[in-house]
Amino acid sequence: MARTMLEYSKTVLKKVSFDAKLFYKELKKALVRLLPDEVEELKVWLETFVVDKPELQKSLIYIKE
């Protein structure tokens, strides 16, 4: 089965989550590349992913726009 862009974006975000600046950069790229319904799914995933990562919680401002 082909890997969707949404799944690819989640994988990249997980891998760069050690660096908040890089995480924000990759998140912005993902928001541009994904389809509108995929962006909504990414928003839901992001809200749960950053719950225990205070340094990444600022990324929620990107999805509120």
Image (cartoon, grey):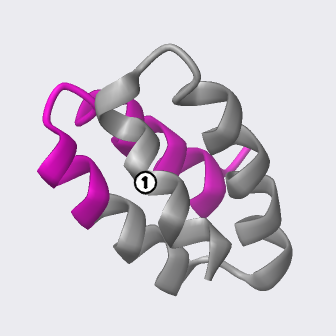
- Residue 26: percent from the left, percent from the top? 30, 61
Q: Is residue 13 above or below residue 64?
A: above
Which residue shows up at 41% across the image and 21% down it?
Answer: 53
Tell me if residue 16 can be seen. Answer: yes
Q: Is residue 11 above or below residue 51?
A: below
Question: Which amino acid, mark 1?
Answer: Ser
Image quadrant occupied by the N terminus? top right
Q: Nearer the viewer, residue 5 or 43?
A: 43
Which residue shows up at 52% across the image and 29% down it?
Answer: 50
Tell me if residue 3 can be seen. Answer: no
- Residue 19: percent from the left, percent from the top? 13, 35
Q: Nearer the viewer, residue 5 or 23?
A: 23
Position of 15 with respect to 27 (left or right) is left
- Residue 20: percent from the left, percent from the top? 20, 42
Stretch in magenta: 1-25
Image quadrant occupied by the C terminus? bottom right
Position of 18 with respect to 12 (left or right) is left
